[in-house]
Image: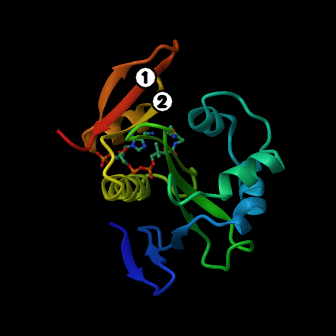
């Protein structure tokens, strides 16, 4: 059970996890680029492969910049970070989604680092992302997941995602329809 407390405006929430850890849940911002690069270097190769679907060895400055400069018209990204100002705070979890141009669909991705996992944070972040997608009146959200990623497949199933075949070997596409 995660305890949540609003922190006022601009929108931000304090989260208290079962292990006592306190995090701030807030939109990603440009100042998170460097902490994201540092955080990336702390990930295991397995975490990187599950999230990026390929073995990346580092997060380039250009990539970190892209991941932290969000166009709110078509993109969404929330972080759960240390309770420090952006730029100082290490980022422990991110959920993001982007509307595919010309469609009413978005692709999502999520990462909860192993230090914070198994406490319901993944579920909370996915729910927030789905809430955003509904506000945007999207028809569906989808993501590509490695076949062996039982954690994500389990989490997605609990949230009502269905599995679709993927064109790429080793991947499963998971999709949640938001409207009939
Ligand atoms: C998948 C991931 C987001 C789950 O985050 P989390 O914070 O641990 O998720 P939760 O605590 O909300 O758990 C949700 C459900 O998944 C289950 N789960 C979590 N880790 C699991 C694991 N390793 N194996 C099986 N089930 C697992 C939990 O048991 C829980 O189910 P329950 O409610 O029946 O107990 C996290 O492990 C992660 O970021 N993995 C690496 C990146 C990734 O795989 N991204 C997905 C592709 S974009």
Q: Is residue 65 left or right of residue 178?
A: right
Ligand 1: quadrant of the figure: top left
15 vs 19, nearest the viewer: 15
Task: Determine if the C-beta at disc 2 is less than 8 A from ligand 1.
Answer: yes
Q: How did the renderer colour the structure?
A: rainbow
Q: Which mark identifies residue 86?
A: none
Q: Is residue 164 above or below residue 92?
A: above
Residue at disc 2, secondary structure: strand
Measured from the top left, where is residue 59 in percent x and y? 77, 45
- Residue closest to the far left: 180
First reached walking from the N terminus: tag 1 or tag 2: 2
Measured from the top left, where is residue 125 in percent x and y? 42, 57
Q: Which residue is mark 2?
A: 144
Q: Residue at x 68, y 71 (%)?
A: 89
Q: Are marks 1 and 2 in contact (CB under 8 Å)?
A: yes
Quadrant including the N terminus? bottom left
Measured from the top left, where is residue 180 in percent x and y? 17, 38
């Amino acid at each position: 059970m995660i305890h949540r407390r609003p922190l006022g405006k601009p929108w931000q929430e304090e989260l208290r996890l079962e292990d006592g850890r306190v995090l701030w849940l807030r939109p990603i911002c440009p100042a998170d680029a460097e902490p994201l690069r540092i955080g990336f270097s702390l990930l295991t190769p397995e975490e990187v492969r599950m999230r990026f679907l390929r073995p990346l060895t580092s997060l380039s400055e250009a990539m970190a910049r892209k991941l932290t400069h969000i166009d709110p018209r078509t993109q969404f990204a929330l972080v759960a970070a240390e309770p420090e100002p952006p730029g100082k705070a290490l980022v422990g979890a991110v959920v993001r989604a982007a509307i595919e141009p010309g469609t009413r669909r978005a692709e999502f991705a999520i990462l909860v680092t192993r230090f914070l996992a198994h406490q319901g944070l993944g579920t909370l972040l996915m729910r927030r992302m789905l809430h955003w997608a509904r506000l945007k009146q999207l028809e569906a959200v989808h993501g590509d997941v490695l076949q062996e990623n039982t954690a994500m497949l389990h989490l997605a199933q609990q949230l009502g995602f269905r599995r679709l075949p993927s064109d790429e070997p080793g991947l499963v596409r998971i999709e949640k329809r938001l409207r009939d």
